Image (tube, rainbow, N blue to C red):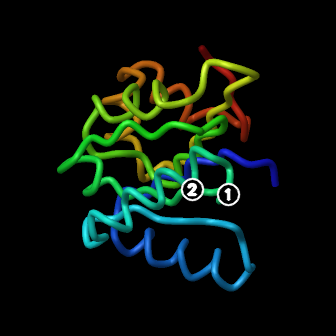
């Protein structure tokens, strides 16, 4: 996997599950959650920016309380949609401007309300009811 992957999880349960999975795969990752100390947060942000760690696992609660500007990300993976609509553009804006920044969002039919907050009611219903399993939009 190419470096600079910002992996966003909205719930603490998903954050822990992803952390355990990445550990089991011996992935080069660091994490920022609501229980992470300030020293570990600074270290994780530096390692991610410098490319020493390829993946940064980031929790929604940490973003809610601190709104860190994460540098070094080229690929955003939203494992679960954020509960607040303003978080999605904030996360996308963290992607680096050089190269080809990408964003992948995982969602299911159960995420309709969260998806509506981000893309609007009609677009969310169209995305949920479509037979396609992948969507590209700007």
From the image, which quarter does the C terminus lie in? top right
From the image, which quarter does the N terminus lie in? bottom right
Q: Image height check: is 124 above or below 45? A: above
The reply, left or right, for residue 88 in relation to residue 63 is: right
Q: Position of residue 50 (x, y in %)?
A: 63, 46
What is the quadrant of residue 90 in the picture? top left
Residue at coordinates 73% horizontally, 79% vertically from top-left?
26
The reply, left or right, for residue 47 in relation to residue 121 is: right
For the residues marked 2 and 1, what is the alpha-carbon distance in whole angstroms?
A: 5 Å
Q: Image height check: is 55 above or below 75? A: below
Q: Position of residue 91 (x, y in %)?
A: 43, 34
**Which label belongs to residue 47?**
2
**Looking at this view, is 23 or 30 the one in front?**
30
Write down the residue under mark 1.
52
Residue at coordinates 38% horizontally, 36% vertically from top-left?
69
- Helix, strand or loop for disc 2: helix
Crowdedness of circle 2 by 10 Å Cα count: few (<14), some, many (20+)?
A: some
What is the quadrant of residue 35 in the picture? bottom left
Q: Position of residue 46 (x, y in %)?
A: 50, 51
Q: Looking at the image, do the residues carrying marks 2 and 1 touch, with CB atoms under 8 Å apart?
A: yes
């Amino acid at each position: 996997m190419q470096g600079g992957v910002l992996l966003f999880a909205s719930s603490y349960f998903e954050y822990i599950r992803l952390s355990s999975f990445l550990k089991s795969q011996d992935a080069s990752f660091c994490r920022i959650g609501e229980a992470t100390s300030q020293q570990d947060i600074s270290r994780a942000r530096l390692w991610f920016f410098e490319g020493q760690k390829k993946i940064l696992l980031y929790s929604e609660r940490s973003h809610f309380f601190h709104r860190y500007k994460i540098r070094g990300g080229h690929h955003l993976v939203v494992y679960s949609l954020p509960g607040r609509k303003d978080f999605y553009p904030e996360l996308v804006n963290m992607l680096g401007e050089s190269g080809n920044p990408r964003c992948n969002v995982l969602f299911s039919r159960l995420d309709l309300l969260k998806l509506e907050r981000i893309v609007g009611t009609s677009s969310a219903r169209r995305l949920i009811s479509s037979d396609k399993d992948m969507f590209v939009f700007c």
